[in-house]
Image: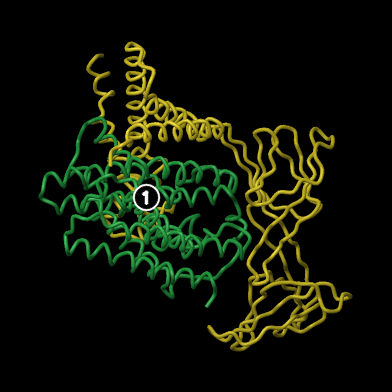
Chain colours: A green, B yellow
Amino acid sequence: MAFNEILAVAGLALIAVAAVPQIIWFIKREKTNETLSQWLLLAAGFVLFGTIVVRSIEIGFPAVTNTYEAMIFFSASVLVVAAILRFISKTGSSSLRWSVFGGTIIAFALVMLSSSPLVEKGVNPPIPALHSYWLVLHVTMAFIGEAFFAVSFVAAISYLLTKDEEKRQAIDRIMYTTIMIGYPIFTAGALAFGAIWAEYAWGSYWTWDPKETWALITWLVYTAFLHTRLVMKVKGKVSAVLAITGFLFTIFTFAGVNYLLSGLHSYAK
Amino acid sequence: MNSIYKFFKSIRLAVVLILVIILFALLSTLIPQGKSLEEYKAMYSPALYWLVTASGLQNYTRGLLFWVPLALFILNLGVCTIDRLVSRARRKAAKHFGPDLIHVGLLILAVGAIITASVRREQDFNMSVGDKVNLPGGYSMSLTDFQYLQYPDGRPKAWISTVDVDKDGQAFRKGVKIEVNHPLAIGLLKVYQTNYGNDASMNLVDEGGAPATMKMGEGLRSGDTILGFASTHPAADPAKGIAARIEEWKGQNFVAARDVVAGDELGGYKVISVSAREYTGLRAATDPGFIPVLIALIMASTGLVMTSFTKSKGVI
């Protein structure tokens, strides 16, 4: 087994281990502020980033140019975002813990999916169109933004499942904050850097390629979330539904478009 | 007048337009774009065919379902932006101008996109070494070298076109390399590396002496075998020039591959000559709209970071 694969397996194991203290905390409903899991999540994230670093050294270019690498990077980003939220949270509330736990599950699922035989895992240097640092910025920042959206997605689901109004308000704040942080990062990565890369690679910054269109649709959903919230002061269920829709569209833009709709991004399989 | 102004500065209108744009953009990705009416007729039931073609969703970015919501949205954005700037100026509010940067940025983006849609020009051409093409602005460009580099596993590593550029008949730039992601830039004019190909062909004669031509990618039938012209490469014997790689197929099954050169027999024909003409595919484009778009992207991203920083501070 290659070293980068060992790191990916170690990352997966660490995610599973990080889930244990979280589950115990939920079962016992302890009042203690369990902190072990946030360190484990952070460690898992860095180990997965290590996978990317090792592959990058092997190919001499940042390894974020195929689906396997994208899934590992996405998973690592979700873990680091979840861990950071735990670190900066002053309350360590159960609402935040549910969101972080959901992030842990999503990160685990991404690494598991990346191990599928259908996902090409070869350590290959990029083809000419992908050999661009604008592409690296485009991909990495889009995924970091989407990592925040992943946590907001879990928060939105727990909002709809919770009846306690106090908890709902706490969850609503998590949902809002994660989107508020993720939105500019996603905008810069998915749209701005994507457009600049496309201009350098193909001479056209926007072509209404299905992937571009779906990235724009996703961005518009989160734009609607922020406008309904900040200007129209709409919170609660509407925000939760938009946050869930936004993340489902994010996942479709990442995975569904590559396989179901053809276009310039078809090599991203 | 006042009611029209109020209508267009409404945030509800903005949200409704965003949802409308989302809906039509989403539908447009599910319908193959730009096909002929016959193709849609074959693809869909009569009712769906009527719905798609009557709505214009098959040519989304050229239809009313694209332009009307977008034009209304830009108008709405413009009125909201002006209203916000005027009210902030009246209050002499200096802080929190992130949203203004975003909105002004998006308006500049719209201007850039309109410029692109109106005046962007592009021209695709294939060139072999020694070829010369005329470019806009009195420039001409000749290809002096072309390299196709591959990784050991055969995947493409780089296509590198080396060109000399003249301006009004005088040497302007010499030995400029054009690669994917590294276009040649002369002011607003950019030349991009887009593709690569090989116009290879074989001249043949049959047993009766009748001439025939076979191009790369074509095949001829010999009994139950298809002989396909797959590629070219220098012949093992340099005196024989170029060899054609022939693949033999029986139905879907690959049987064997062999090389043929001038003088060889091929499925009842005699090969007279094999020629290959490698070419590089280039695209010359001028787009004055990209500069405002770039400025807009920087402004909007900066505004978003500022707004995000202000609005998310201390929330969790």
Q: Which residue lies furthest to the top in this view?
A: B90
Question: On screen, A40 above or below A217?
Answer: below
Query: Which quadrant would residue B253 be assigned to in this image?
Result: bottom right
* Left or right: residue A241 compared with residue B186: left
Number of marks present in the image shown:
1
What residue is rendered at 33% in x and 30% in y? Answer: B72
- Residue position for label 1: A84
What residue is rendered at 25% in x and 54% in y? Answer: A33
A137 or A101, which lies in front? A101
Question: On screen, A143 above or below B287?
Answer: below
On the image, the x and y values in percent for residue B204 come to 75, 75
On the image, the x and y values in percent for residue B270 come to 77, 81
Question: On screen, B55 above or below A82?
Answer: above
What residue is rendered at 27% in x and 47% in y? Answer: A243
User: What amino acid type should be assigned to the residue bearing mark 1?
Assistant: Ile
A60 or A129, which lies in front? A60
A9 or B30, which lies in front? A9
